[in-house]
Image (cartoon, grey):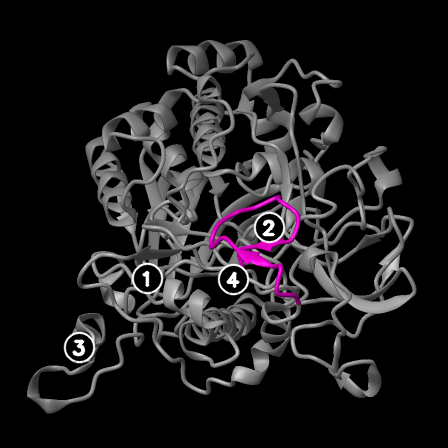
């Protein structure tokens, strides 16, 4: 027996002879019995344990505000402490303030330990005097006119605050407050975006497209009556430029190791190797194919997955991204089809929050099963070429990370949820510095980046085959400012709420903004804005922008390039 396998069995075997499930703590949501009704009061209530939430809470607390910080789960730091440590930086000189302090204190900007990140976030919150309340899930919001009066948690606690911050990856708080939002991709004509909508042609056209090989999508090749292979959508693909309600794929940012003591890839409950039949066919389709186990843009190469010491991401045509498995995650709904004209924005909660959390739990566990099954397939299935399988088995889960969840990340990478619709929408023109703003609250600089949104049957050169769609990575010419107006709702919808994470942006622009350092930057700016609004007794829409900019500069924020 391999050392790694023995270690994994030792972990499974609990004291007293019980056979413990190392993944028993691996969940998105577990319903609890509410306690007695309890009222909490503060100046600023921050909902969402993400880096944006951490930064907003710390900043407001250092400005003398009583802050309550609520995390949906048992952790703080979101993806930064949940696996994404190969940080998507963009331009380092665009990072300032608390984000810069965090990376300086942890000692590096990339490839740090997730557990070290969470430890540092907790230290910074404690130093600032922020009261942290874990495992609090929003149930409802009470408003009077355009102002949020309170939010109620599943614990039975009702929180009253002068200002609220929605720092969730999904935008649950602002949706519960009736603020307008979109889910999915706008048609390219909506904002005049060359990268907008489906089948954009400017970048990544040939990346992770099964090497443009004519792989049949059917169970029996060339026999459509045999049905589609698993993980291929039966929905018709839209036309170039059309919008849809699909969101880019999610995955877990697993931490892997090839060192002694690595934990062998587990076989998930209900494992079915047929789920990976398309990958098996691809792996054996052409002897010229080369497998990099990393990112690649070279012809006739594919991942099919990234394997490295540390944060290991999606890196292939059929990889850790669970394409199509997340469409209902943002707000519980999904409507198939495509459109050329953007539908009206959504308001409210089409699915009640507690019901939505239960749905997300099922989606979460499906993602766990999919990705664990994929790793087990690559490590064990006879369809995998022997040389590749040997390389895969040099790796396993890192035994030093995520110890309470079987060494599997506790945070699903929600790359995109709801996106607020405010009076100002960040678009491709902002990312390309063709549209400037005077109310900058920080800079973004990462390429306009989206993972695949669908895997569909297409006709290519007269052959029926399968392709991924939605993947792009188009560079910005330089750092560009994010508008304060994009993180505040329309005044007629809510006057005491800031949204630093699910801000007002098109799908294209959000793909550039949605990076963890930028979330920290925007979160800190939201904390400053909230404090100014509280001190002046005005709405977040009516704060003095001059005062905001002076304080942001004093805090080390970089506002212009």
Q: Mark 3 vs mark 2: which is more N-terminal?
A: 3
Residue extent of the magenta highlight: 286-304
Q: Position of residue 291 (x, y in %)?
A: 52, 57
Which element is circle 2 on?
A: loop
Q: CA distance from mark 1 to mark 3?
A: 15 Å
Q: CB under 8 Å between callouts 1 and 3?
A: no
Q: Judge depth for marks 1 and 4 and give the one in front.
A: 1
Q: Judge depth for marks 3 and 2 and give the one in front.
A: 3
Q: Mark 1 vs mark 3: which is more N-terminal?
A: 3
Q: CB under 8 Å between callouts 1 and 2?
A: no
The verdict on residue 299 being magenta is: yes
Quadrant of the snapshot with the N terminus: bottom left
Which element is circle 3 on?
A: helix
Q: Residue at 7% across / 88% down in the picture?
A: 16
Q: Mark 2 — residue?
A: 416
Q: Judge depth for marks 1 and 2 and give the one in front.
A: 1
Q: Mark 3 vs mark 4: which is more N-terminal?
A: 3
Q: Mark 1 — residue?
A: 395
Q: Mark 1 vs mark 2: which is more N-terminal?
A: 1
Image quarter of residue 131: top left
Image quarter of residue 392: bottom left
Q: CB under 8 Å between callouts 3 and 4?
A: no
Q: Position of residue 342 (x, y in %)?
A: 86, 48
Identify the mark at residue 320; answer none if there is no mark. 4
Q: Residue at 50% across / 53% down in the picture?
A: 292
């Amino acid at each position: 027996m391999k050392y790694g396998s023995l270690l994994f069995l030792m972990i499974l075997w609990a004291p007293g002879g019980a056979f413990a499930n190392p993944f028993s703590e691996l969940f998105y949501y577990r319903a609890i019995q509410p306690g007695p009704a309890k009222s909490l009061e503060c100046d600023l209530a921050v909902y969402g344990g993400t880096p944006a939430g951490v930064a907003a809470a710390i900043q407001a607390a250092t400005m003398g505000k009583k802050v309550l910080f609520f995390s949906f789960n048992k952790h703080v730091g979101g993806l930064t402490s949940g696996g994404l440590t190969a940080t998507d930086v963009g331009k380092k000189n665009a990072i300032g303030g608390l984000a810069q302090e965090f990376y300086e204190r942890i000692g590096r900007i990339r490839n740090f330990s997730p557990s070290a990140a969470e430890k540092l976030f907790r230290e910074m919150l404690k130093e600032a005097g922020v009261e942290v309340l874990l495992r609090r899930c929003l149930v409802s919001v009470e408003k009077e006119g355009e102002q949020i009066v309170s939010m109620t948690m599943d614990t039975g606690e009702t929180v009253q605050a002068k200002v609220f911050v929605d720092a969730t990856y999904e935008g649950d708080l602002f949706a519960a407050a009736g603020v307008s939002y979109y889910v999915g991709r706008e048609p390219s004509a909506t904002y005049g975006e060359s990268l907008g909508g489906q089948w954009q042609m400017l970048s990544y056209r040939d990346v992770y497209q099964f090497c443009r090989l004519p792989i049949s999508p059917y169970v029996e090749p060339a026999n459509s009556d045999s049905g589609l292979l698993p993980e291929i959508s039966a929905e018709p693909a839209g036309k170039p430029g059309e919008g849809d309600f699909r969101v880019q794929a999610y995955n877990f940012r697993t931490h892997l190791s090839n060192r002694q003591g690595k934990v062998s890839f587990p076989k998930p409950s209900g494992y079915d190797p047929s789920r990976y039949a398309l990958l098996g066919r691809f792996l054996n389709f052409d002897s010229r194919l080369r497998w990099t186990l990393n990112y690649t843009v070279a012809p006739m190469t594919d991942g099919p997955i990234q394997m490295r010491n540390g944060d290991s991401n999606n890196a292939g045509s059929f990889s850790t991204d669970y394409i199509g498995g997340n469409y209902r995650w943002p707000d519980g709904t999904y409507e198939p089809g495509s459109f050329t004209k953007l539908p009206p924005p959504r308001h409210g909660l089409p699915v009640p929050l507690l019901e939505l959390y239960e749905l997300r739990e099922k989606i979460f566990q499906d993602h766990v099963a999919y990705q664990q099954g994929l790793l087990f397939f690559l490590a064990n299935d006879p369809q995998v070429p022997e040389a590749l399988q040997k390389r895969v088995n040099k790796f396993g889960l890192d035994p030093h990370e995520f110890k309470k969840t079987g060494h599997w990340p506790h945070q699903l990478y929600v790359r995109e949820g709801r996106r607020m619709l405010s009076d100002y929408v960040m678009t491709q023109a902002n990312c390309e510095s063709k549209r400037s703003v005077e109310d900058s609250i920080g800079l973004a600089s990462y390429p306009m980046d989206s993972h695949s949104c669908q895997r569909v049957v297409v006709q290519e050169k007269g052959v029926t085959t399968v392709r991924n769609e939605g993947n792009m990575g188009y560079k910005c010419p330089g750092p560009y400012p994010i508008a304060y107006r994009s993180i505040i709702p329309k005044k007629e919808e809510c006057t005491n709420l800031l949204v630093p994470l699910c801000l007002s942006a098109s799908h294209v622009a959000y793909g550039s903004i949605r990076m963890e350092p930028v979330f920290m930057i925007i979160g800190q700016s939201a904390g400053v804005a909230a404090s100014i609004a509280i001190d002046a007794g005005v709405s977040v829409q009516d704060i003095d922008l001059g005062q905001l900019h002076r304080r942001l500069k004093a805090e080390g924020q970089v506002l212009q390039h």
